Image: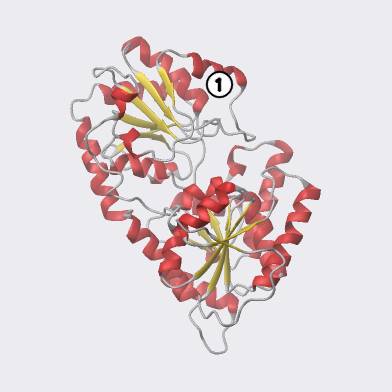
Amino acid sequence: MSSPKTLQLVSGSRDTSKHAPHIVVGVTSAQHFLAIKGRLRALCEAGFRVTLVSRPGGLLEIAAREEDAEAVGVPMEREFAPYTDLVSLVRLWRLLRKLRPDATEFSTPKAGVLGTLAARLAGVPRRVYLLRGLKVETAIGFRRLVLLESERLAMACAHVVICNSASLRAKVLELGLAPAAKLRVLGDGSSKGVDLDRFAPGPDEMRSRLNIPPAAPVVGFVGKLTRDKGLPELIDAFDQILMKEPLARLLLVGWFDVAEDGVDERLRLRIQNHPSIISTGFVADTAPYYRAMDLLVLPTRREGFPNVVLEAAATGVPVITTRATGSRDSVVPGVTGLLISPRSADEISKAVLKLLCDPQRSRMGEAGRTWVMGRFEKRHVLGMTVAFYLNLLKPRENENPGRLVMDSAERSA
């Protein structure tokens, strides 16, 4: 396997011998790249030159190699850090001045604000902010004010904001973060779609590997183990479920994220020591784990558009998730799964027990796969992204960059 094409921060101006349109895509950490995996490769295969920017490290190199993109490491902190943030902003500005890309696409809160601001200061002609969720929804106090202003600044510096779902766009408007004319949802949402060959119903090999009894109902969860994903409520709900279904197992496919909403040590130990909870840690390929589940629960408090719900549905697994921003777009209530209130252990428990006792549960899984096939197939979703950027970067005479971006977004939405 070839190594990624790594650029140095000291490199000179753009090589004019390369005629491919150049897009710089930035995230705070390569870990965040998992949510948009496949996006860069699709752009590269469509003829774009793509540079991935994130915090330096092995994950960045791996991500760039897999996507056939160039890689540049720029240190960025996840949390508010005024001095470090200023240094990161200057580094991003210098990088964009040297690369002189045709467009930028930044996402995640920190890279979003620093990247779009640096792109504006560097005079990048087409600036896109990919919004994949709003941390501000669960923040309080001073941190909420900082996040609100950061989002407002990031959107002000972008020509267009691609929102990951319709309800996320509605939340942006409700919070007054950007004008409606600047906000777009491509198709039905989602940042990368679903690989229907990889995520598909099939024989289960995982239960035996995890020593799960054949008759045990398996309630699944996939994602970061954090408060915002609803882990405290899920663990409380599972203890209630065990009173009615003592053989049940809770399968947690994910890692304890070191973040501001990470779970406390008490809950971590409770999970690790629980005899009926299986916690896998980080898993590179989650597809086989879905086939071990009877249903998936995502009791999230906020989302952009949850990929895990689409992946479970594509595998034929019924889903329970919340009416929170983003997650409510990922389920057809009563058809592909159930919607419940966020932050409610009781509602999680009742919904899980309802589905486990429903002999028609498999029909929800079948309907879920059909729904995903019609709206979120990977090539379809990534094709809309490619079409958006093809229109965005199409040469025009006497163009006005701001108007060009808005016109392009209209055609691609």
Residue at image position (38%, 21%) is 349
Which residue occupies the foreground of this view, 242 or 247? 247
Q: Is residue 200 left or right of residue 13?
A: left
Q: Which residue is mark 1?
A: 268
Q: Percent x, y for residue 9?
A: 70, 63
The answer to whether 193 appears left or right of 148 in the picture is: left
Most extreme residue toward the right is: 83
Q: In terms of depth relative to the viewer, which is nearer, 224 or 229?
A: 224
**Above or below — where is 4 with respect to 315?**
below
Quadrant where the N terminus sits is bottom left
Answer yes or no: is residue 339 visible: yes
Depth check: 148 or 363 in front? 363
Q: Can residue 385 be seen?
A: no
Q: Count of labels shown?
A: 1
Residue 90 image point, x, y percent: 76, 61
Name which residue lies at 63% across and 76% down: 14
Rendered-image quadrant of the C terminus: bottom left
Q: Position of residue 205 (x, y in %)?
A: 27, 30
What's under tag 1, amino acid-wise?
A: Arg
Whether 365 is drawn above or below 219: the answer is below
Q: Position of residue 228 (x, y in %)?
A: 54, 34
Task: Please name whichever residue, 348 or 47, is drawn nearer the observer in this view of the structure.
Answer: 47
